[in-house]
Image: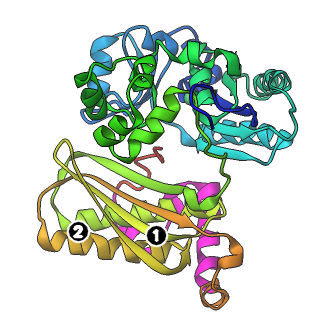
Amino acid sequence: MSSGTPESPSRRILHVDMDAFYASVEQRDDPNLCGKPVLVGFDGPRGVVAAASYEARAFGCSSAQPMSIAKRHCPNAVIVPVNMARYHEASDQVFSIFAKHTDLIEPLSIDEAFLDVSRICPSIDDATELARRIKTEIKDATRLNASIGVATNKFLAKLASDLEKPDGLTTMRPEQVLEVLGPLPIERIPGIGPAVAKKLHAIGVRSIAEIREVDVRVMKSKLGRLGGAVADRAWGRDDRPVTTDRASRSVSCEETFQTDVADRAELRRELALMSERLGRRVRKAGLQGRRITLKIRCGEFETSTRSRTMPTPVDRTDLIHEAAEELLDSWLQHDGRPIRLLGVGVSRFETDAQLDLFAQEAGDKQRRVDRVTDELVSRFGREALRRGASLRAPEIARDEDQE
Ligand SMILES: [Mg+2]
């Protein structure tokens, strides 16, 4: 790509993002919440805001904020607990609308995805028309609003979807790119967090346009490998394809404790519950992954992860649990500090063709057990679970999957 011009408009990409998703579902389902500041999340000392309605955002509330702070910003906010089952239901409806139009879908989260519509939309105007149709279909099916950005690459589409939120439809045409990006703060480029921003501020760079004036070699010496990508983004370039590839995804569950936990038996119980939940989600997504990761946070910020690569891809609760427990035990052996957050994840998903057939056969029996368990839970709730380690936990139904 020649420098000084935005990327050639060879792709048409949509970035679809539901507006204040969890909060909007709650407002849709309870008319009493309409027009009111709503915070979705756990109302306790360590609770975190999972979503804030636009009314609550006006008071300075935002997602990922500690609930205690959000309540200080907006004492009159209505706090509702997370109800993942209903958000998943709406999410499924939204994603099946995407699937009607293209199979090039890259999910970013439960309410957000990139769609590559290049094949079906020869021009950016066609892509805008399709985006309008998708917005209408989502509204008709779910009574929820989506904001969509239309552009020639992922970076620009994601930026565009945010420009006219909520209920926005924004097309960034190639000839507008440099002008639109120029005045934006550098923090709008993914990868530029506070630490990187500080380095760039130190050389007098605050806006995206100012990045363009810095020699790429200087950018690379300041930021390492990120430097090249940052320079590209400043010119509106991004050649990353929309990947539907399972290998790039990961599924995880984590839990922040009300008070730090040092008791090993309790940690093992939590881990068993989490592995159960994680296994269920991995199987529901039809995935099998090779890497199991344990995440541990002590105190406010100190997070460490440990991973194990499995000989064959797994989706079975017992194998996930076994690996996670080994990782936890090895952590506990050298570090006995109380734990604030515990998490477990599966990643490096592989397609079915790559599966070890022999291992699959050997696991058939356990897989049947898992299938029955999943069905029980979906029909009768988590209390129906009667599997070894989870049984002893007193508060099986306490938390919903938070993601
Ligand atoms: Mg969203």
Q: Is residue 156 left or right of residue 346?
A: right
Q: x%, y% of residue 15?
A: 66, 31
Q: Residue at x 85, y 41 (%)?
A: 119
Q: Which stretch is magenta?
A: 365-394
Q: Amino acid at mark 1?
A: Arg
Tag 2–tag 1 contact (CB < 8 Å):
no
Mark before the other along the chain sequence, 2 or 1: 2
Q: Decide if residue 171 is in sight here.
A: no
Q: x%, y% of residue 345?
A: 44, 60
Position of the N terminus, as image quadrant, is: top right
Q: Nearer the viewer, residue 212 or 16?
A: 212
Which disc, if any, is residue 291? 1
Q: Residue at x 24, y 32 (%)?
A: 45
Residue 386 located within the stretch drawn in magenta: yes
Q: Is residue 334 above or below residue 191?
A: below
Q: What residue does disc 2 label?
A: 265
Give the quadrant of ligand 1.
Answer: top right
